Image (cartoon, coloured by chain):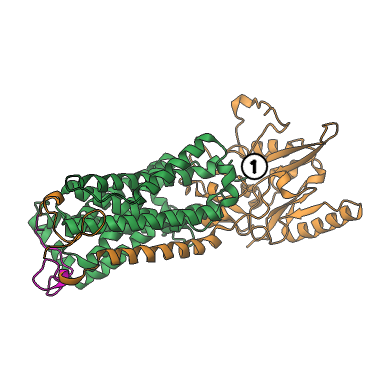
Amino acid sequence: MSVPAADPHWRGWILAYFYLGGVAAGAYLLAGIAQLSDSRRHLPMIRTAHYLAAPLMAVCAGLLVIDLDHPLRFWHMLFDPISGRAVFKPWSPMSLGSWMLLVFGLFTAWSFLCALADDERLGLARLCKPLRWLRDTRLAWLVRGAGIACAFFIASYTGALLTATNQPVWSMSPLLAAVFCASSASTGAASVTLAARLRGDALPDVQWRWHRLERWLLMLEVASVLAWLYTIRSALPLLLRGSGTQLVAGATALLMLLPLLPEPRPLEPAVELPASWRAVTSLTAGLCLRYVVLWSAVAIR
Amino acid sequence: MAQAVGFFTDTTLCIGCKACEVACHQWNGLPALHGGQKPLTGNSYDNTGSFSHVDWRHVKFVEQFSADRGQAAWLMMSDVCKHCVDAPCLDVCPTGAIIRTEFDTVYIRERVCNGCRDCIAACPFGVIAISPSKHVAQKCTFCYDRLQAGRPPACAQACPTGSIQFGPIDVLHARAQARLAKLHAEGKPQARLYGADDSVLGGLRSFYLLMERPEVYGLPEAPLVPRRSVWKSALAGLVNAVLVALAALVAFRRRGREGQPGTSASRAGPDRGRLPVEPARVPPMSAAPDICPGPYGAERPGPP
């Protein structure tokens, strides 16, 4: 296929950012909703999510800076170096995303510090006290709501960013934002359940609820991917022309569908295994999905 | 604002001499790659191949052959940045490095660009490339420095056949319409203008007279304006965000005795929404088989 548009060479760093950013946003938004609905029972899961989100966002910021051809100019995303004024283009997903990344980074850092304070891990009683006070005010509820909204944005804007191009496949459908939103949520749930399992302090019924949610979100992800594939159906024959691409696409489909298969009634000693396996599969499927989406614009050329 | 200017490229007059490419390199100080040696691509006499960080103009050679390859014809076209009215690169550029000048052309401020490459993804014509030495996006500047000095762009001045015509955009539009009418009158109904009206990205400041469909010249028929897709994407994302939130609320909701006073899930009292300092440690799941639903599948009966 002859494509006049040039390849932006968004490869490994961007793939890692899309994935890790999605996991962080998904974990944070689900923790936020859990906080709003039943914070006490879900507390270990919430803390696990907050311990995951902030470091992942820090890594994401690093990935985005590294990917720039002029990394030291990363701050030009926010301010014009000549006029000194803020640069904000709400119609540009990358401009809006840069500002939202900053805001979401602050939210995740605040939640991370709160989790540390709750676990008495900071060792700084003076810092913990104002943090707890801040967290328990009415303002905190507003902050949590805003944090959830930000997390939803981060979870889905990368799809909108790809659509707002003239690249083949990416620009063909507006559903990429929906696909990434569902994928971020499912991988976020999977990361929290997996990490909580390692921490071992969550109530069994709470873990079960998160596993059930993970399964629902994966169903939503699969449905979104199918809808997206339908909207790009004219490009599918070109995309699937090579055996290598068929292999990657098949592996992605398998990884997404495997956790949805009905599982046998678990025997008591073996109950630990399936959930971890499902979470790992779900996380891998999310990574493969983003790889396939990013690579599709290259493969069709 | 100064008068809007543009290029009208009449491809019927192009002879593929590449004087425009040479003039562009010379005026803008663009180096020759590979020691000035440009090997043939092997499938065309077009040895520039594509736009790059040093090739801001590209003379395309479109070779056309009959089925038995007994007859051949060449279409030639000197391609360049279109300086679109609804420029996708300018729309998406997050740093504001890409601006519209007082001549209504599109210009990249090198001091501001940080090499995010969003403009490359957005440009439907593939005219932008990253300079490996400057690490910023590069493309035709429409000889902004020459325009400011009241001089025409180097390529237009160098073109020996008048294929690249420079001037006020209104004058060029009128000239193009007259040329099109003349070609139609000469029995060449396939002649058409590309980018002269607002059907392509709101209009192109560098527009073309073509003798074939745009695709034949490697031009997209209907390029997209990125900002128009953003709202559709936002709506699609919002639908799934609502579904995710609903799923999470249903999954996390409390039922029956979980919400009664005295249980760990009690909602009553001042602790609602607050996180206790010390979470209750519970035994691992395998050691607490009778608590509430079954962990990973069918629900099991709770304790009596």
Front one among B121 and B196: B121
Confirm whether residue B61 shows in the render.
yes
- Which residue sits at x=75%, y=61%? B170
Q: Magenta stretch containing residue B268, yes or no? A: yes
Examine the structure image and report whether residue A214 is included in the region drawn in magenta: no
| Secondary structure predominantly adopted by residues drawn in magenta | loop
Quadrant of the frame with the N terminus of chain A: top right
Q: Residue B123: x, y in percent? A: 58, 50
- The foreground one among A25 and A286 is A286
Q: How many marks?
A: 1
Whole-percent x and y of residue A292? 46, 44
Which chain shows up in orange? B
Figure quadrant of the C terminus of chain A: top right
Categorize mark 1 by other alpha carbons within 10 Å: few (<14), some (14-19), many (20+): few
Residue named by callout 1:
A2
Write the start and end of the magenta stretch as one range.
Answer: B258-281
* Chain A rendering hue: green
What amino acid type is highlighted by mark number 1? Ser
Q: In x, y percent, where is residue B12?
A: 82, 45
Identify the chain of the residue marked 1, using the numbered disc in the image: A
The residue at the point 53 percent across, 48 percent down is B121
- Residue lying furthest right in this view? B186
